[in-house]
Amino acid sequence: MGLALAGAGLLTCGRPALAQTIPIKLLLGWRLEGLSALFLVAQEKGHFGAEGLDVVIEPGSGSRLVPGRIAAGEFDAGYGDVNTLVRLRDSRPGLDLKAVMMIQDRAPFALIGRRSRGIGDTPASLEGRKLGAPATDAAFAQWPLLKTLNRIDDSRIKLDAIGFAVREPMLAAGEVDGIFGFGPSVLPGLKARGVPAEDIVTLAMADHGLVLYGNALMVSPKFAAEQPGAVRGLVRALIRSLREVAADPDFAAQLVARRTDIPQPEVERERLFQSLQQTVLTPAAREHGLGSVDPARWAQAIYQLDMVQPLKDKAKAGEAFTAAFLPAKEERLF
C-alpha cells in the first residue's frame, strides 16, 4: 500500500510554530494497523510538528526489512525488528545503524494454532502438525531459537512457505494447523474471520524461553549525526503519543481504521489494546521507563541470538541500541 502521510504544520500545546521544520521519512514495519496508531496519533495531534518535525510515514511490508532499507538510505528512521538490526550490524562491520527507542519491550513473536487441529498450550504439541510461515516473517526468524530452547523435533513438523496475505485465511480454513506471526495482531484477525476464540491457541515465544525484545525506533547513522535534536524530538513525540493512545485507544483505533482499505475499528482496537498490554506497557517498561532496555536482559538476548546463529562480533552487535536520545527516566515513566 503506497500510502504516505505528512505531518507538517500541526501544532499542539500552544507552542509557537518553529522557523524551520526538519523533514523525516519514516518506514513502518507493516501496514497501518495496531501499534501504527502511535505514529498516526503523534501526527494527528501535532506532536511531530510541535517538535519542529515534518514526518512522512510509509507503511511497510515486514519488520525485518526495515533495518536494511534504512541502511540503504531510503529512509531516515523506521519502526522495525531490533533482532534483525543486531544481525545486520554483525554482517556489515562498517554499519553503525542503531535503535534509539525500544517500543516493544516484550517481543510479540508467536505461533498461533487451533485446538481443533491438535495444537495445545505447549511447544511439544507442534510436533506432527503442519505450520505455515512467510519466509521473511520476524516470528518465523526465531523458530530456530524456539525449537532449540524447547527441544522440539522439527523432523516431525511440516513447514509450508506461505504469503503474509494468506496466512490468516489458511489457518481459518484449516489448510494449516498453525501459523507464525505477531500474536496480538493475528488473534483479532482470526476472530473476525469467524474462528471461535476458544479454538485459538497463542504460543507466545516470550512464554517459552525467549528473552528477546521486539520492534524499536531506529534512525540512520547520517541522520542521527546531523540532526541529534530532531531524533530526541521524534522520541519525545512518540512517548507523548503513547500516553495518549493508552488513555484513549478508541480514538487511536478509529484513526487507524480511517486510513485502511477495509475499516474495522473494533478489530484495530483489540489489536492495539492487546499489543499495548502484552508488548509495550510491560511491568519492566513501567518500572524503568518507556523506551529503554535492561542491560542484563539485553546481554542475554544477544547471547540467545548467538546460540543458533553465531555472531562474528557480539560486542558490536550488542551496540545496536543506544539510550543517548531518550529523555530522563522521570519523563518516561508511565
Image (cartoon, rainbow, N blue to C red):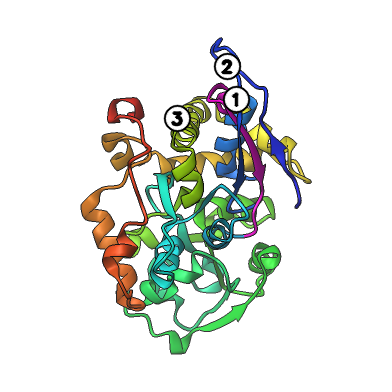
Is residue 210 visible in the rendered image? The answer is no
Give the residue at x 29% y 42%.
284
At mark 2, the secondary structure is loop
Identify the image quadrant of residue 133.
Answer: bottom right
Q: Is residue 56 magenta?
A: yes
> 221 or 310: which is nearer to us?
221
Q: Residue at x 70, y 63 (%)?
A: 165
| Quadrant in the rendering for residue 333 | top left
- What label does residue 49 carry, if any? 1
Percent of width and height locating residue 320: 37, 56
Residue at left offset 57%, top offset 28%? 48
Categorize mark 1 by other alpha carbons within 10 Å: few (<14), some (14-19), many (20+).
Answer: many
**In the image, what residue occupies the spot 30% across and 71% down?**
313
Horizontal side, residue 225 vs residue 303: left or right: right
Residue 108, percent from left and from top: 45, 55
- Marks 2 and 1 sit apart, C-alpha to C-alpha, by 8 Å
**Residue nearest the observer in this picture, 114 or 91:** 91
Instruction: Name the residue tied to disc 2.
Output: 12
SS label for mark 3: helix
Residue 191 in sight: yes
Contact, mark 2 vs mark 1 (Cβ under 8 Å): yes
Write down the region rendered in magenta. 45-61
Give, as a three-letter code, the residue at label 3: Arg
Q: Which residue is mark 3?
A: 236
The quarter of the rendered structure image containing the C terminus is top left
Identity of the residue furthest to the front in this view:
226
**Left-right relation of 72 to 109:** right
**How far, Cα to Cα, is label 3 from label 2?**
13 Å
